[in-house]
Image (cartoon, helix red, strand yellow):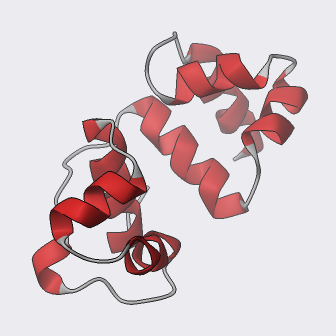
């Protein structure tokens, strides 16, 4: 799976466990601008582009869900689990094998 600058910025923030507001403050930009970067509606300046290396399997799943515009609730319902459990899998805090298998069936 090829990642975009938007994907990398999102994964960078998620790996640090930070909110969009926290990263915006650290980058000294408004939260509105930072959110626009993560949504891909405004180009990310070169100095804020991040390298994240190889994606972990659960990160790939999160990116696929975001790219499809699906909510955690919708995917959880399709998988037959709770949204909270899906969130734990997407954050790497619960085994994500079922999530990975579900996405492999989709693609």
Q: Quadrant of residue 62?
A: top right
Instruction: Using residue 9 as the reference point, say whether residue 39 is left or right of it.
Output: right
Residue name at image x 56 percent, y 20 percent: 88
Residue name at image x 33 percent, y 36 percent: 17
Instruction: Using residue 61 as the reference point, say whether residue 82 is left or right of it.
Output: right
Tell me residue 13's x, y (percent).
31, 49
Instruction: Using residue 53 as the reference point, say whether residue 11 is left or right of it.
Output: right
Location of residue 39 with respect to 101 vertically, above or below:
below
Q: Residue furthest top?
A: 95
Q: Is residue 50 shown to the viewer in this render?
A: no
Location of residue 39 with respect to 106 vertically, above or below:
below
Residue name at image x 35 percent, y 77 percent: 30
Location of residue 75 with respect to 19 vertically, above or below:
above
Seen from the viewer's position, the closer of residues 5 and 104 is: 5
Q: Report the number of numbered marks.
A: 0
Q: Quadrant of residue 46?
A: bottom left
Tell me residue 73's x, y (percent).
81, 36
């Amino acid at each position: 799976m090829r990642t975009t600058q938007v994907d990398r910025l999102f994964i960078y923030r998620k790996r640090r466990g930070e909110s969009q507001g926290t990263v915006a403050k650290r980058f000294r930009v408004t939260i509105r601008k930072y959110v626009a970067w993560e949504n891909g509606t405004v180009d990310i300046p070169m100095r804020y582009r991040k390298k994240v290396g190889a994606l972990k399997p659960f990160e790939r799943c999160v990116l696929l869900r975001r790219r499809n515009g699906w909510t955690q609730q919708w995917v959880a319902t399709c998988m037959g689990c709770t949204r909270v459990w899906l969130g734990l899998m997407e954050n790497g805090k619960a085994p994500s094998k079922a999530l990975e298998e579900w996405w492999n069936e989709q693609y």
